Amino acid sequence: MIRFGTLVAGILLTAGGALAQEPDSPGDSPPEVFEFGSHYTLPAGQSVEELVIVGGSATIRGQVEGDAVVIGGSAELAGTGSVDGDFVVVGGSVAVAPGAEVDGDMVVVGGGVDTPPGFTPGGELVTVGPSIQGLIPFLTRGVLMGRPIVPDLPWIWAAVAVLLAVFLGVNLVFENPVRSCIQVLERKPLTTFLIGLLVVVLAGPASVLLAVSVVGLAVVPFLWAALVVAAVMGGVAVSRWVGGAALRSTDADGRGHQALALLLGFALICLPMMVPVLGAVSLASLGVLALGASAVAVAAGLRKEQPAPVPASGPVETAPMSEAPVEASPLSPPPEDPPPSASQAPPLGDLASSPRATFLARTGAFLLDVLLVGLIFGFMDLDEGRWFVALLIAYHVALWTWKGTTVGGVVAKLQVVRTDGLPLAFSDAVVRGLASILSAVALGLGFFWILKEPERESWHDKIAGTCVVSVPKGGGGSGAA
């Protein structure tokens, strides 16, 4: 039986012990050896207790009294060499010379095995998977170092060239969607980044929720396909946006200018991706920005399809042409307009321009709603705290959609409205409710953003395109933090 658990524990213990290993003095037990990113040779006639090589190769001519593990490199076991424990090589080939001995299991993952006739280890000989030696330099000098582009690997540049060709084709065929994404990036880059971060955070949980249902399982592949398309479309827009900013040219409508901006932006984006750590940070940031640009552009397109409400107006009566207009007497007072009804709420367009709610008012309304939902949660006798968060979000989404109000909002005289004056739809309420999770998990920074913004908008306000306003008595209210 292959002792994989023992091997993993041995790797961790060996690595930790070897890093703190002091030079041996005569009479000490054999040392434990841990090497990273280099070639190690164990001379004939010498022995070590454990041998762990990560990102390098090993030549064993002496004796390994315990396990020998080589990850991301090849291993050579000479005729004078022996391994008393298990011999494990991951991502590299193994060459065993005549006379070599392995007393434990010999496991090779993602590499080839060259053994002499009649060689058998003391345990089992197991090979797993095809050879992945071509990917090892990318994993060790790319992924582990935090950079997606390793300059000295030719196949990396071939992949970059293919990606650039895809970007050029998308830019040529889908000009209008790309232009919409660029306009989003130019108007609100921070909001776009936050929305992209929200998409990344919710993609995993949404896939899990869909997968647990029989019907939703078929939707998961389409969801991830849509995310890939959005990332590519947004990536083209980000490249053109960066290149256009570098060119500082106003000829944005010319095909030549668009291609040049894309090429220059793509090149500027690739440069930091060759730097360790900075490359991973750049890739993650630009990927989030690309997803956000696509998401906002799609949401804006869907919002345009919703017709704006037409104000009701009665037929306009005009006096006959034959009748002379009646002039008012200079002594008669001007006609008075009828007083507005006290029960009539102001139009939504007026609410969008109303004074923004203060941080204290929004916090007070939210705490009242939390208290109310807490009482409901206690009556429902639910044990797990995660159901409280789900119930709190469902409470807000339902009441925002139904009446645009919550109990806390009525007390604090607050209301959530869309910034364009249209009524809050169910989709707007759902987006705002889910986006509030992002504002909360970022140590509450999304909520405290109200104190910084002139319009007193939180992160979830920016993402959903909403604002919280103070309304007069009788105008309704909607509590939200």
Image (cartoon, rainbow, N blue to C red):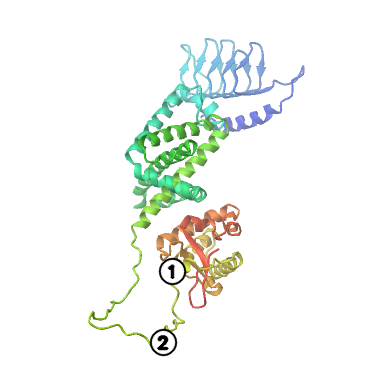
Amino acid found under the numbered disc labelled 2:
Pro
Q: Residue furthest bottom?
A: 331
The residue under the point 56% across, 67% down is 357
Q: Which of the image's four quarters has the C terminus? A: bottom right
Query: To which quarter of the image does residue 249 belong?
Result: top left
- 100 vs 229: above or below: above
Query: To which quarter of the image does residue 266 belong?
Result: top left
- Helix, strand or loop for disc 1: helix
> Looking at the picture, how far across and down is residue 199, in whole percent?
46, 49
- Compute the Cα span from label 1 to label 2: 39 Å
The mark found on residue 330 in the picture is 2
Amino acid found under the numbered disc labelled 1:
Leu
Judging by the rendered image, the residue that carries numbered circle 1 is 348
> Looking at the picture, how far across and down is residue 300, in whole percent?
39, 54
Whether residue 244 appears in this view of the structure is yes
**Would residue 159 be found to the left or right of residue 197 on screen?**
left
- 33 vs 203: above or below: above
Instruction: Tell me which numbered mark, 1 or 2, is placed earlier along the sequence.
Output: 2
- 257 vs 385: above or below: above
**Would residue 213 be found to the left or right of residue 4 on screen?**
left
Query: To which quarter of the image does residue 358 belong?
Result: bottom right
* Mark whose residue sits in front, 1 or 2: 2
**Would residue 4 be found to the left or right of residue 12 on screen?**
left
